Each structure stands twice: as structure tokens, then as C-alpha cells.
Image (tube, helix red, strand yellow):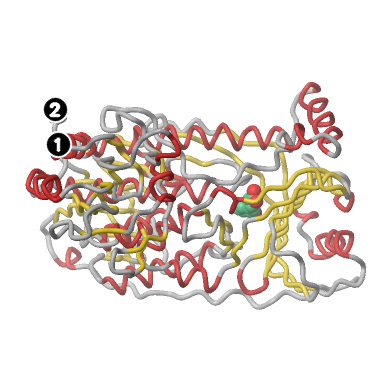
Amino acid sequence: METFAFTPAYELPAWPFTPPPELDSPKVVRHPIVIVGAGPSGLTLACDLAQRGVSAVLLDEDDTVGVRGASSRGICYAQKSLEIFERLGIYERIAAKGITWSFGRTFSGDEEVYNFNLQANSVSRQPPFINLQQFYVEWFLVERILEIGVTDLRWKSRVTRVQQLADGVRLDIETPAGSYTIEADRLIDATGANSAIRTQLGIEAHASRSTDRWCISDVRFKKPLPTERWTWVDAPFNEGRGVWQHLMADGVWRIDYQMPEDCDTAYISQPEVAGARLREQLGPDVEFEFVWIGPYGYRDHLLDSFRHGRVFFIGDAAHVVSPFGARGGNSGIQDAANLGWKLALVAQGRAGDALLDSYDAERQPAARENLQVTSRSARFLAPRSPAEHTLRRAVVALAARHPFARALVNTGRMSVANAYPVAPLLPEGGCTVQNLPLRWVDGRETTLMQLLADGTQCIGLWFAPTREQADAAREATASLPLRLVAVGGESDNHGLLTLQPDDTLAAHLGIGIGIGIDDRGSFALVRPDAYRAAVLANATPTTIAAALRTALALDAAP
Ligand SMILES: O=C(O)CCc1cccc(O)c1
């Protein structure tokens, strides 16, 4: 029998367990923020808070990144996540290590039936996607958290019990040096899909499991393949079933093969069987080494609410979707970025507690939308009813010749920054503001993320304010977390930071002349998570302060 080579396993870092002070003390210490789980969402939240100068305790039962014995789970990082990583100071590391892409092609048999270029609608400094093994992202986040140095990172610390109190949460923690108890003003569960905290608190996840079966081959090739996302609805080299192909770091390709529903999972993941599949796809002489082979079936779940008293659920602990479109990991990172600034401002007494409720009001519908979108892709890939089979056959047959049908070919709709619904703190709803390259009046370059990187404040972009307006607005908002920035106007805006006039910025914010609103005097309020919270057509110091107070729940009933 032919044997197949495996590359040596990834060498992942390990961080030391340091016995915490609570182990030697009978006193139950209270911490403002405790995060459980050092996966992508927990680490992003800890890093986001650290960047804002806010310390959190981060507990993880392991002492490394990645999932032991498994391959990388997440592989595709979307623009919004990359913009968050830019603000957190790890984007350059991710871009240097990962594979940047924006183009996707979908095939039926040997024919291309759909393609997309995600760069087309982008004004961001970050590309639409970078592929990178999840453990590298986690690793860079840990490095950054250690660089900033304000997070209390506790490895080898397993939470065994969680109890909600009237004004906080009590946690029992087991470590190699013994057990201890702490309390938290607020607890964030980032422990993933199988959250024991969720189970212990009796919170229903509404889980469902698909019967669709897949097998991952992570492989290194000698033969170069295109660095685009390629998918097949019905690949001739996979017995007419689906295939996904992505390049990740270190020259490793992720190839996902759809398998028969009743397959023997041990058999399909044997190296000889996986090797035969690769040869069918890439030719009998292709030279390769396996990195990892593994079967999987996907599942989904969604909590009704992401906030339960003093406990917040983020990432897979709150929602799980099928992998099509890479919406799982990316939405966990966006959960963290949504919650981080809110926790920081509320903990500092600079925003109302109702701001924390807006985490659920914004991210739960976002997760629901992701679940709907990925479920539609899953049904296209594995139709369940005769009608779904007929529809898919018709769409694929028409797509080859008729452009209208191409958009119906659905092998996944790639992750986007979800818009947020109209709500008391977001009277116009919220939409993402991309990381536009900008220029100060003196010619220096900056970006929106750089404007947001220091401290925790909203950015007020005010188009051509007069000196008098600028002075009055500074006074009206002096006690509020706002950085006022003029865009164009009088060259010396009386001490206001001033950007060069920028039509792309105005249009992106929805205040360009081209879309009917004169930009002179217009104002856009951008939140610390780079979501547009309000647009004012003829801003005054009073309306600016009112918009800010609304966005920060400063006028809401306690
Ligand atoms: O391209 C896609 O739609 C998702 C690719 C993906 C994401 C996460 C895991 C995996 O095996 C494939």
C-alpha cells in the first residue's frame, strides 16, 4: 500500500502557569471584568480592553493556542476583523504571515458559473480577506496582550462553577496549584460552542446538527494553485459533490471535500483515501505532503439573548453557524469589538449601563442574520427536499449561460460587518465605517483606525465647521468621550484637528453632495467600534452633544 508523508506538527507556544495571589488568601477578590476562554473572541476582547487601558482577568484551561490534536479551525479573516486587528496593533503581523485575497470563483463541473471581486466595493486600507490559520491569530493576540501588559492572563485555570449574584458573578477556578474563588462585576463567556458556563446557567442554545458530512485535507503542494477562493458545487473529481479550496500561511492548502451523508468517517480520513481524492483533483503525479486530515459535520446554535444579568456571551458560546462564508470566527471577533468599548466606558463611569444592553440588541440580530445566510448556503449545498434539488439543478444549468442566475449559485456568502437595527441608542441604525486612508491638512497620512486607536472615544467628523461652531462644540462636549475632527473648512480651525476635504469619506459616511446632502456643516458620529451612529445635516454644538449622549446611553433611565 502507498504511504503518504505528513509534515511535522505545528510547533505552538506554551505560556507558564503563574499561581495567582488569591490561591494563598482566604479573601474572595472582586475583579471588574473576567473573561473565560482564550480563543479568538476572548483574546480579541482582552486585547481591545487592554488597548483602552482597561485591565481584565483572562482565564483559560490550556496554556497554548489552537486546539490540541486538531487542525486550524478558522482560516479566513474578513475586512472588519482585519480593521479591528489594525486598531489593536496586530494587523501588520497578520498581513505578513497570511494570504491576501479578494477574488472568488465557483465551478459546476469544469465550468465557471459564478465569480466575485470583493475589492470592488471597498474603500478600506485592509483587504477584503486574509487567510491565516486561527492559532497564528490567537498567538499574535497573546503577544500583543503581553506587550501592552495590563491584562491578568491566567493559563491552566479551569472554571468549575459559576454563580450569578445580585451585583456580580462568583467563579470557582481549578489550577495545577489548587482551587480558588473570585468574583467579577461582569463575566464574559468566550469558552466556545460547548460552553459549560451556558449549561450551568441553564441557558438554551437551540442547537441543531446537519447530516451533511465533509472531510478536510490540509496539504502542502509542490504545484502552485491560484490564490483565490475556489469552490465547486459539484466537482467531477469528487463524485459530483462540493469542494472548497483556500491557501493559508506556510504554503498549506485547506481543501474541504463534501462526502456522502452515510460515509464511514474513519475510512474517508485515511491518508490513502484522502490521497486518492487529491490525485483525482490535481492529477496522478501531484507531489504533496499532508498536514492534517479530519472529518467534520457542522452544527448551529443561537442564544435568544447574549446578556444574562452580569454574564455576557460572545463568539461560539453565543452562536455557531456552518463554515460557508467564514461568518463564525469573524462574528466572534466583531462581538468582542462591539462589547469592548462599552465595557470600558461603563466601567469608567463615562457611559450609562444601558449601553451594555445594546451589545445584545446589536450582536444577537447580527448572529441571527449570519445563521439565516449560512443556512441558505447549506441548503443549496445539501438540498433537503425534491423542490430544493430541482431549484439547484435549474440554477446551476442556467448560470452557465444567463447572468441573472449566477447570483443564485450559493456556495457561501462571505462574512460582512452586519448593519445594526434601529434602536433607542441607534435611532438611524448602525453601519460599519471602513478604515479609510485619510490625510491631515499638513499632508501627514492617517486612517480611521488610527484615529480610534488611542483611549476610548467616539470620533466626530465635522465637514467644514466655522471657528465659532468648533469652539462652542468643544465646550459643549468637553466632559464627553468625543474626539472632534474637522474635515476641510477654514485652514486653522482654532485648534481642531483638521483633515483634508475628502469626497470618498463624505460619500462613505452618507453625506456626500453626490447623494443629495450638502456636506458643509454635516457631521458624522463614529463609535469606537467604527460604526456610524448618527449623521447630522446642519450640526450645532447642541445637536452634536445630544447625538453623543444618545449613543452612549447617558440620557437613558438607569
Ligand atoms: O470559503 C468559505 O466559504 C469558508 C471556508 C472555510 C472556513 C472555515 C473552515 C473551513 O474548513 C473552510
Distance Cα–Cα, label 2 vs label 1: 8 Å
Q: Nearer the viewer, mark 2 or mark 1?
A: 1
The percent coordinates of residue 160 (x first, y second) are 33, 51
- For the residue marked with disc 2, what is the amino acid? Ala
- Asked if labels 1 and 2 touch by Cβ distance under 8 angstroms, the answer is no
- Disc number for residue 554: 1
Q: Nearer the viewer, residue 368 or 501?
A: 501
* Quadrant of the snapshot with the C terminus: top left
Tell me residue 331's x, y (percent). 47, 46
Where 91 sits versus 193, above or below?
below
Q: Residue furthest top?
A: 387
Q: Classify 10 Å Cα crowding around label 2: few (below 14), some (14-19), many (20 and above).
A: few
Q: Locate residue 11 relative to residue 1 in the image: left or right.
A: left
Q: Mark 2 = which residue?
A: 557
Say above or below: 413 vs 79.
Answer: above
Whole-percent x, y for residue 397 in the image: 86, 34
**Is residue 237 among what the camera can see?**
yes
Q: Name the foreground residue: 484 vs 51.
A: 484
